Amino acid sequence: MFSALDDVKDKIQGFELGIDDYITKPYNFSEVLARIRVVLRNRELYAQIVVRESRLSLAEELNKDIKLNLLDFVAGIDDLDAAIAAMAKDGEDGKNRNAGLFKTVLEKSKKVRKQVAELDARIDRTNKEWDKLKKNEIDLPRLENQIRDNMLKE
């Protein structure tokens, strides 16, 4: 903002209304150019923060979806295991020629279950770390106010 008013209360009122900088007359063109660069840099940094926050929100949603899908996947493996166990029991009388196949499927099922458990544990560790980071996170409006307050101090 350019103004002939150079009283501190006028400057403070301008900043409280949302201006990025306050320049009084007479002004030096080099100083104005430097201040414009600072404002543009701060705007770009703020825009980058907004983009990064959007990415983090999307990643957080994806993480929740993966966790829910893992639970469904484990339930499907449980059903598969139960079906295989029932089929194996029916074939115990020696009539079942596919006992080797049942054993292979059970082994694969156990391997997949282990991989799902490892992924689930990894997601849990990530969520705990995420929660720790979120405790120190500053929301965007508060960050913008802090940036504005820092500019007032300069």
Image: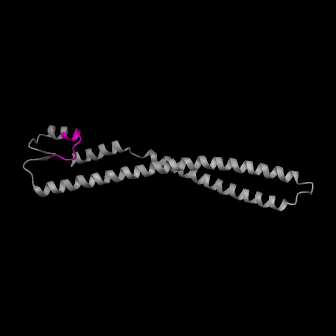
The magenta span reads: 14-22
Image quadrant in which you'd find residue 98: bottom right
Residue in the picture at 34% in, 42% down: 142
Where does residue 74 sit, x and y in percent of width and height? 67, 49
Q: Position of residue 63 (x, y in %)?
A: 53, 50
- Is residue 61 found left or right of 52 in the rendered image? right
As rendered, which of 21 and 133 lies closer to the eye? 21
Is residue 10 rendered to the left or right of residue 43?
A: left
Residue 116 x/y as whole percent: 65, 54
Q: Residue at x 63, y 55 (%)?
A: 118
Image quarter where the N terminus lies is top left
Total count of labels: 0
- Identify which residue is drawn at 88% across, 54% down: 91
Residue at 50% in and 46% down: 131
- Is the magenta region chiefly helix, strand or loop? loop
Residue nearest the viewer, comparing 28 with 63 = 63
State whether residue 118 is above or below residue 142: below
Q: Is residue 14 left or right of residue 112?
A: left
Whether the magenta-drawn stretch holds residue 15 is answered as yes
Q: Magenta includes 134?
A: no
Residue 137 location in percent, x, y? Answer: 41, 46
Hey, which residue is sitting farthest left in the picture?
26
Colouring used for the render: one colour
